[in-house]
Image (cartoon, rainbow, N blue to C red):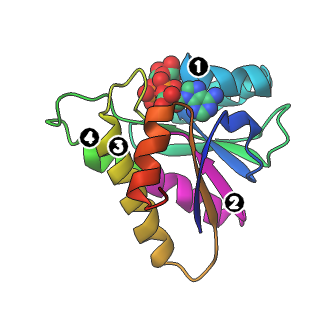
């Protein structure tokens, strides 16, 4: 099941929320900043320990931490591609963010997951193209699994919300 809402992902009631992080996993602005502020410093410590052991998180990959002070069952951090005019495999890398995050959610047996609009802020991915990749990837992935997972796309800005609504035929 796919839902779209307009709002702040830290307020989403999903089991697990996804963070649009950077490879160093040190926090940042945008949704990354909002999640780190709400979850507290324990998340930075978990991320630091993970990077020490595994190295930086490559673009398109995902890793899991606790949710710190947030009420969720965890946070999945993924690194979206920086938009480089479509010449750097950005579509594929963005699709991998969604796929790898969904894999973790299934592996951990969660019932619901909330995604932000990965890469559409500082990383500059055109919003319509990113929504197309996000929706198609999630629909294909859910269609290939027997287990149910509720997926919410949390749009923070009206433009993304309108794009998602029109793609999902909800207007
Ligand atoms: N809840 C949901 N979505 C949000 C929130 C929020 N609280 N705040 C912003 N957004 P961005 P990126 C939306 O820039 O483009 C960070 O500094 C925002 O409107 O957060 O993947 C990281 O550390 C936009 O649609 O992430 C990286 O360095 C979407 O989240 C870099 O930015 C993504 O915007 C990652 O860039």
Which tag, 2 or 4, sits closer to the chain's start?
A: 4
Label 3 crowding class (10 Å Cα cut-off): few <14, some 14-19, many 20+?
many
At which x and y percent is residue 132? 33, 52
Query: Which residue lies at the image location 77% right of the left edge and 49% below the top edge?
Result: 13
In the structure shown, which secondary structural element does the residue marked by tag 3 occupy? Answer: helix
Which label number is shown at residue 112?
2
Magenta span of residues: 98-117
Q: Residue extending furthest bottom?
A: 146
Q: Distance between the residues labelled 4 and 1?
A: 22 Å
Which label number is shown at residue 73?
none
Instruction: Judge depth for marks 3 and 1 and give the one in front.
Output: 3
| Residue carrying label 4 | 90
Mark 3 and 1 residues: CB-CB less than 8 Å, in contact? no
Q: Residue extending furthest front?
A: 171
Which tag, 3 or 2, sits closer to the chain's start?
A: 2
| Residue carrying label 1 | 26
User: Does the Cβ of the disc 1 residue fall within 8 Å of ligand 1?
Assistant: yes
User: Does the Cβ of the disc 2 residue fall within 8 Å of ligand 1?
Assistant: no
Q: Distance between the residues labelled 3 and 4?
A: 9 Å
Which tag, 3 or 4, sits closer to the chain's start?
A: 4
Query: Which residue lies at the image location 46% right of the left edge and 77% below the top edge?
Result: 143
Which tag, 1 or 2, sits closer to the chain's start?
A: 1
Residue 103 counted in the magenta span:
yes
Which label number is shown at residue 130?
3
In the structure shown, which secondary structural element does the residue marked by tag 2 occupy? Answer: strand
Q: Is residue 155 left or right of residue 90?
A: right
Label 2 crowding class (10 Å Cα cut-off): few <14, some 14-19, many 20+?
many
């Amino acid at each position: 099941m796919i839902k779209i809402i307009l709002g702040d992902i830290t307020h989403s009631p999903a089991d697990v929320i996804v963070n649009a992080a950077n490879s160093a996993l040190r926090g940042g602005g945008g949704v990354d900043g909002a999640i780190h502020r709400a979850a507290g410093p324990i998340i930075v410590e978990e991320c630091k320990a993970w990077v020490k052991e595994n190295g930086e998180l490559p673009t398109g990959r995902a890793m899991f931490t606790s949710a710190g002070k947030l009420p969720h069952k965890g946070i999945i951090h993924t690194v979206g591609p920086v938009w480089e005019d479509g010449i750097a495999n950005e579509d594929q890398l963005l699709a991998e963010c969604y796929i790898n995050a969904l894999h973790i959610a299934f592996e951990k047996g969660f019932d619901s997951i909330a995604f932000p609009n990965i890469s559409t802020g500082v990383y500059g991915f055109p919003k319509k193209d990113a929504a197309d990749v996000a929706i198609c990837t999630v629909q294909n992935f859910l269609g290939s699994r027997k287990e149910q997972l509720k997926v919410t796309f949390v749009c923070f800005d009206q433009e993304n919300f309108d794009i998602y609504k029109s793609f999902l035929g909800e207007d």
